[in-house]
Amino acid sequence: MPKENYYKKMFLIGAIWNWSATVPFALGYKILFPLFGMALPDYVVFFMMFLGLAFVYGIGYFWVSQDIHQNHGIVKMGILGKLFVFVAFLWAWMVGEVPLILVGPGIVDLVFAILFIEFLNTYKKSGVS
């Protein structure tokens, strides 16, 4: 498969991105929410469940980085999840729920979704089975 090392690194970076985006918010949401001019969540459990799920997606990307010939279902779920995050942040900004700066992580997820799609297309075209 072409660019195999590139794709392995891409998924590893995707895993690190998810982990680095979730851990600081899980540990420091009481500081970060006011810093962004947002109220603390009323029900922290739902926020923590989202962060936990995003962290677990990172584990999935790590698994893909270890063997890019397996776990393509994780890649497909990642595409859907990352597109959802982008749309959710964009919508939340448009209705005034979050500041514009928080659309940035959504854009990063959009870029990863595009790269993941490109990976699946390249893999399919390479004829590797």
Image (cartoon, rainbow, N blue to C red):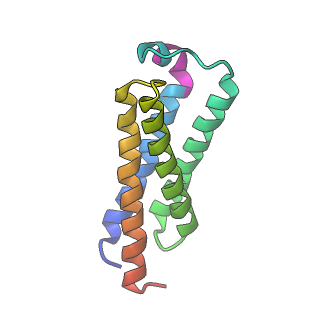
Q: Is residue 71 left or right of residue 111?
A: right
> Is residue 57 part of the magenta span, yes or no?
no
> Is residue 29 part of the magenta span, yes or no?
yes
Residue at 55% x, 55% y is 60
* Image quarter (top left, top right, bottom left or bottom right) of the N terminus: bottom left
Q: Is residue 114 left or right of residue 95?
A: left
Q: Is residue 104 above or below residue 11?
A: above
- Helix, strand or loop: magenta stretch: helix
Report x, y in % for residue 59: 55, 50
Question: Which picture quadrant has residue 121?
Answer: bottom left
Residue positioned most to the front: 95
Residue at 41% x, 41% y is 106
Report x, y in % for residue 101: 35, 28
Residue at 36% x, 75% y is 122
Q: How many marks?
A: 0
Q: Is residue 69 above or below residue 97?
A: below
Residue 86 in sight in this render = yes
Question: Which picture quadrant has residue 12?
Answer: bottom left
Q: Which residues are magenta?
A: 26-32
Residue at 44% x, 14% y is 37
Residue 13 in sight in this render = no
Report x, y in % for residue 20: 44, 36
